[in-house]
């Protein structure tokens, strides 16, 4: 179907179809009519076909077709039929029509001429003419001079002359003096003199008092005195009312009263043709 001024889809649309595959059909009277149009234009399995009005509300009852207006969009979707070949024409086939190609003749091969030598003069040859190299006399090897010892003085030897080292006397460890006992008095010995320890007499055992019962009154006993509990009489059983049958009328009975079906007359038997 084609679009109208209020838009192809509703604001709460959750499913959209392919605009290039839209089909304009008359306004269907019920779901059977709408399903017939869908199966005619689309290769869909009839058991899986579903309809969504403007991509939002699914159409499941015949009364939903009363909300359709002219140029409304109904999204049709379902599973493709199995084993049914596609018999339509795609946009690629209609736009790019296949043409028969004419066979092309092979181009004739040109005759190849024989390569002849170049007899002219190039700029390289005129700028750089060839010259005959002159023969050079052989070179005689030089004799190496005999190696002589070095008898001079270097700057290192003149700046850093070698000096004779004087012999150092052998180290003799000093003799140790014998350790003598300490016969003086320290500040600890003068400040903290030792005193004889006096023997202590054992303390007499403390007698344990005997536990006596509590004869006073606590705040709990004075504030919360025990009171006698009076026995309660058992409550009388409540008589249960008998369940009475419902004699009123419900909204279902008032809206859908029962009708007696009319008996149909039996059709007269037809005689077989002779």
Image: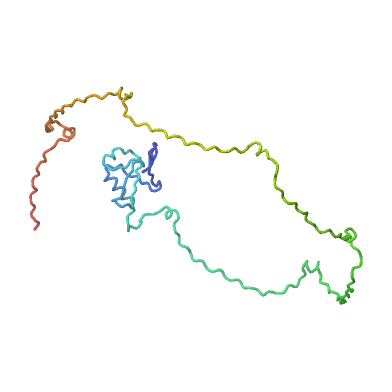
**Colour mode?**
rainbow
Q: Quadrant of residue 194?
A: top right
Residue appearing at x 83%, y 58% in the figure: 169
- 112, above or below 207, in the image: below
Q: Is residue 88 left or right of residue 146?
A: left
How many numbered circles does the render carry? 0
Q: Nearer the viewer, residue 119 or 41?
A: 41
Q: Nearer the viewer, residue 240 or 120?
A: 240
Residue appearing at x 51%, y 37% in the figure: 200
In the displayed image of the protein, which residue is found farthest to the right? 152
Residue 31 screen position, x and y as percent: 27, 44
Q: Nearer the viewer, residue 124 or 187?
A: 187
Q: Quadrant of residue 86?
A: bottom left
**Quadrant assignment for the N terminus:** top left
In the displayed image of the protein, which residue is found farthest to the top? 223
Residue 150 screen position, x and y as percent: 90, 68
Q: Quadrant of residue 28?
A: top left
Residue appearing at x 34%, y 48% in the figure: 77
Residue 266 screen position, x and y as percent: 8, 47
**Quadrant assignment for the C terminus:** bottom left
Residue appearing at x 42%, y 33% in the figure: 206
Q: Is residue 41 left or right of residue 118?
A: left
Q: Nearer the viewer, residue 125 or 194?
A: 194
């Amino acid at each position: 179907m084609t679009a109208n001024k209020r838009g192809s889809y509703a604001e709460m649309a959750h499913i959209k179809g392919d605009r290039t595959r839209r089909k304009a059909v008359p306004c269907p009277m019920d779901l059977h009519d709408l399903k017939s149009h869908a199966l005619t234009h689309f290769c869909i399995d009839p058991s899986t076909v579903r309809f969504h009005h403007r991509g939002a509300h699914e159409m499941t009852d015949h009364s939903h077709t009363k909300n359709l207006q002219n140029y409304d969009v109904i999204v049709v979707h379902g599973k493709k039929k199995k084993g049914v070949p596609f018999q339509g024409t795609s946009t690629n086939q209609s736009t790019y029509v296949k043409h028969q190609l004419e066979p092309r003749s092979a181009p004739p091969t040109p005759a190849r001429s024989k390569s002849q030598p170049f007899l002219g003069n190039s700029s390289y040859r005129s700028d750089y003419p060839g010259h005959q190299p002159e023969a050079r006399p052989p070179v005689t090897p030089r004799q190496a001079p005999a190696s002589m010892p070095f008898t001079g003085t270097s700057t290192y030897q003149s700046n850093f002359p070698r000096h004779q080292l004087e012999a150092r006397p052998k180290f003799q460890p000093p003799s140790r003096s014998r350790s003598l006992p300490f016969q003086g008095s320290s500040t600890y010995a003068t400040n903290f003199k030792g005193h004889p320890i006096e023997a202590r007499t054992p303390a007499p055992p403390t007698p344990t008092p005997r536990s006596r019962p509590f004869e006073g009154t606590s705040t709990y006993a004075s504030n919360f005195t025990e009171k006698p509990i009076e026995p309660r009489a058992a409550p009388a059983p409540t008589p249960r009312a008998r369940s009475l049958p419902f004699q009123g009328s419900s909204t279902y009975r008032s809206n859908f009263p029962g009708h007696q079906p009319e008996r149909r007359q039996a059709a007269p038997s037809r005689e077989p043709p002779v």
